[in-house]
Amino acid sequence: MYRSFKRTMNAAKKPKKIANRISKRCFRNKTTTISAKILVSGGVNKEKHGLNRLPPEVKNIIYKALPLNADRACLALTCKDQAAAYEALKTEKNKKGYDHIVPKRLTEIHRLQLLVRLKVDMPRSHRLCYSCVQFIDIKDPDNAGQWGGSEVRVSGGKATKQAMIEGPRCPLCISAKQLENAKHKDTYKKYLALADKVDLKK
Ligand SMILES: [Zn+2]
């Protein structure tokens, strides 16, 4: 009984994933946050790196000079000390003194900029889909199938709207696109009904 229930649930997982892609309900775009749990665990060895010995004001100047949120997040990910400086800077309400404009509203492009930077450090089992903007576990049977798009077109860390169209896209995104283009609108509507109910305004 349980086994057949589990099978049914698993079978429903894939259409749901496709539905979430059609209605673009995969995730919300948020500024990268380094969990406080990570910051307090272990401890920070300040002596290891010259950059960490700098006073907080200088660290802030460095962070503010970086062009993108994604660049700041990447520096934060290098060590706990940097992560702490990054989180402290984020608490500043007025975004003054930045060399480049800090976006007020975050989009999937900002998310892509970060994921493109993390790509090299990801295990081979996870491939970046430029369409749904997430790392896809290629070993998960739900995600099996042929990928579309081109790795070459997005070489050199391209992370633009154009890259989202031309870059590699996962089999689920391909299915979603096919359904969107399908003449059978009934099937399309059935899929949409499966999408997670997420209030994006929250
Ligand atoms: Zn995808």
Image (cartoon, rainbow, N blue to C red):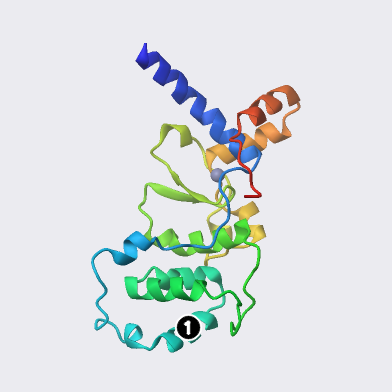
- Disc 1 crowd, CA 10 A, few/some/many (<14, 14-19, 20+): some
Tell which of 127 and 23 is nearer to you. Answer: 23
Tell which of 202 and 155 is nearer to you. Answer: 202
Q: Is residue 123 above or below residue 62?
A: above
Tell which of 195 and 148 is nearer to you. Answer: 195
Quadrant into which the N terminus falls: top left
Residue 66 in the image, given as x and y percentages of width and height: 53, 79
Observer able to see residue 184: no
The residue drawn where x is 46% and y is 62% is 33
The residue drawn where x is 62% and y is 61% is 106
Q: Is residue 46 above or below residue 170?
A: below
Observer able to see residue 143: yes
Q: Is mark 1 within 8 Å of ligand 1?
A: no
Q: How many marks?
A: 1
Q: Amino acid at mark 1?
A: Asn
The residue drawn where x is 62% and y is 54% is 164
For this orientation, the residue located farthest to the top is 1
Tell which of 126 and 199 is nearer to you. Answer: 199
Q: Is residue 185 above or below residue 97?
A: above
Q: Quadrant of residue 140?
A: top left
Q: Is residue 20 above or below residue 27?
A: above
* Residue that numbered label 1 is attached to: 60
Q: Quadrant of residue 87?
A: bottom left
Element under disc 1: helix
The residue drawn where x is 38% and y is 72% is 84
**If the picture is divided into quarters, which one holds ligand 1?**
top right
Residue 88 in the image, given as x and y percentages of width and height: 45, 74
Residue 49 in the image, given as x and y percentages of width and height: 29, 83
Residue 61 in the image, given as x and y percentages of width and height: 49, 86
